[in-house]
Amino acid sequence: MILDSYWSYGLLVLAGFVAGAINSVAGGGSLISFPTMLALGVPAIPANATNAVALWPGSLASVWSYRKQAKGLGRLTVYLTLPSILGALFGAWLLLNTPEKLFNSAVPVLILLATILLCYQPRLKRQLEKHNKATKNFALTFFLQFLVSIYGGYFGAGMGIMMLALLGFYIEANINQLNAIKTWLGTVINVVASLFFISAGSVLPFPAIALGLGAIVGGYLAPQLAQRINPNYIRYFVISIGFVLTFIEFIW
């Protein structure tokens, strides 16, 4: 690793700032922070664990901002919290028990998947805004949320888009209510996975602090800056980076 100089930690703070800002405006911030850690020589598995721990505090602010939209959804939210906890634990455990060579081979596929999900995000939101015939199959929703949570605990980038798709087709609610549920469940998954990674000693503390500080500042300032910048431009920027990183990882 080359995390032995002030400039490398300065780069992590900057990456955290950009990731936190992107997460609060368009989503996909991990496509910035995770590859930055890889570029600094951090092995993929601890880089992924550290990235998860560093970025989750930013989601707490989103939970608070959606508190009004979540009114009346308490029972449903509690119902889906259990598979989120179980899935996050299994996903985090699976990550730490994946051979490093295998995970390194999976990294470009995971980055590509997250990038494709980010491409699909606007279309999904439009479909959900029109969609008003939920199946209300709660048993299937429970199981699918468990599967999404495994992915969230394992890698996480693009998890929110997966959950929006799942919730929209199996729960009758408007887009703001779906976002409220998604934000809470995503925070639960991130916190559970982060606690697992910390307890397993898989997190690099100083890089996590550097990323986290940047992410908090970026997440706080981004909504103000977003009023001057079209969020779609930010999303296109992240998508472009995602495809470039996928290409680099495949040929590296």
Image (cartoon, grey):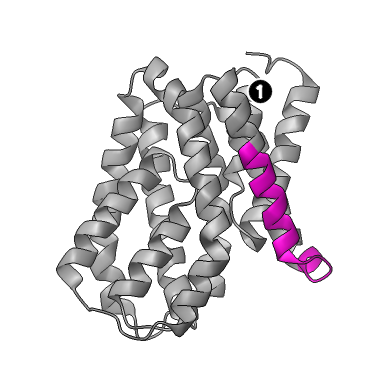
The answer, for residue 207, to whether it is visible in the render is: no
Count the labels in the image. 1
Q: Quadrant of the C terminus?
A: top right
x then y, percent, for residue 68: 49, 83
Q: Which structural element holds mark 1?
A: helix
Nearest to the observer: residue 8 or residue 114? 114
Task: Please determine whether, in this image, residue 10 is positioned above or below residue 90.
Answer: above
Tell me the residue at 38%/38% (across/down): 154
The answer, for residue 48, to whether it is visible in the render is: yes
Q: Residue extending furthest right?
A: 228
Nearest to the observer: residue 41 or residue 198? 41
Tell me the residue at 58%/55% (across/down): 58
Task: Please determine whether, in this image, residue 118 is positioned above or below residue 210.
Answer: below
x then y, percent, for residue 172: 32, 83
Decide if residue 233 is on the left or right side of residue 150.
Answer: right
Nearest to the observer: residue 233 or residue 143? 233
Decide if residue 147 is on the left or right side of residue 41.
Answer: left
Judging by the rendered image, the residue that carries numbered circle 1 is: 39
x then y, percent, for residue 107: 48, 29
Q: Which residues are magenta?
A: 224-243
For residue 186, which quarter of the picture?
bottom left
Q: Specify whether residue 242 is painted magenta.
A: yes
Q: Quadrant of the N terminus?
A: top right
Q: Decide whether the magenta segment is chiefly helix, strand or loop.
A: helix
Q: Specify whether residue 105 is painted magenta.
A: no
Tell me the residue at 46%/64% (across/down): 183
